[in-house]
């Protein structure tokens, strides 16, 4: 990559980081202005268009990056699990680390999931679906269950985890620790339920065959 291309990529990254830094519990992406983001990134407002068509394209890029960051962290968690440790506890701990380190990235996913823009809602839904699919792949390989079971389990887990993440944004460290323990318990209950349901379905099938 040439010097000019590198500089362009650095400026693009600066714009993305500037937009993330301006999000907060009180401020959503919809309230950001192009001028504010450009000023924070240290460029003229007119230079913004060399990197993004408009503010919406910037926002969609941020949604993609937020989802990718989360999926990459969870992949790292699964690598740690492979070296030993509780699958659920390690995953929950990693997820809460993501919330603590990247609160605005998670806020963006939460808000735009039910926002007014159809393009943003679709982008967030796509990221969540990627997350569910990767988890289902892992569970299918680890637990040797049919895809229908692992997909249902993954969807239930992701729904609960995202709900807990929303709660985690607005509580202190001690409360977040309690939330982690509650989340671990809830996810274990889902896992146990899926396991026993699968066994029951197998037993029903064996009974039919024996008849």
Image (cartoon, rainbow, N blue to C red):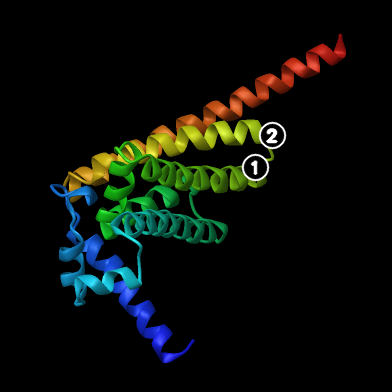
Mark 2 and mark 1 residues within 8 Å of each other at the beta carbon:
yes
Q: Residue at x 25, y 44 (%)?
A: 168
The residue that disc 2 covers is 146
Tag 1 secondary structure: helix
For residue 165, say whether it is visible.
no
Residue 12 coordinates in the image, percent (x, y): 34, 72
* Front-most of residues 175 and 121: 121
Question: Mark 2, residues whose alpha carbon is within 10 Å: few (<14), some, or many (≥20)?
Answer: few
Q: Is residue 141 left or right of residue 76?
A: right
Q: Is residue 168 left or right of residue 3?
A: left
Tag 2 secondary structure: loop
Q: Residue at x 47, y 55 (%)?
A: 71
Residue 19 coordinates in the image, percent (x, y): 24, 62
For residue 124, say whether it is visible.
yes
Q: Residue at x 38, y 41 (%)?
A: 121
Residue at the far left: name it: 26
The residue that disc 1 covers is 140
């Amino acid at each position: 990559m040439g010097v000019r291309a590198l500089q362009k990529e650095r400026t693009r990254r600066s714009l993305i980081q500037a937009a993330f830094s301006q999000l907060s519990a009180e401020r959503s992406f919809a309230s950001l202005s192009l001028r504010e983001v450009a000023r924070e990134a240290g460029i003229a407002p007119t230079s913004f268009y060399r990197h993004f068509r408009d503010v919406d394209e910037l926002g969609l890029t941020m949604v993609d990056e937020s989802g990718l960051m989360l999926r990459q962290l969870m992949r790292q968690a699964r690598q740690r699990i492979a070296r030993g440790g509780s699958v659920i506890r390690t995953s929950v701990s990693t997820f809460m680390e993501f919330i603590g380190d990247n609160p605005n990235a998670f806020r963006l996913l939460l808000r735009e999931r039910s926002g007014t823009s159809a393009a943003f809602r679709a982008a967030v839904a796509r990221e969540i679906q990627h997350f569910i699919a990767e988890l289902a792949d892992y569970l299918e390989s680890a637990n040797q269950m049919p895809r229908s079971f692992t997909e249902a389990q993954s969807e239930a887990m992701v729904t609960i985890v995202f709900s807990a993440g929303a709660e985690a944004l607005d509580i202190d460290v001690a409360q977040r620790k309690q939330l982690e323990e509650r989340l671990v318990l809830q996810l274990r209950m889902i896992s146990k339920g899926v396991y026993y349901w699968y066994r029951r379905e197998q037993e029903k099938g064996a009974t039919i065959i024996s008849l």
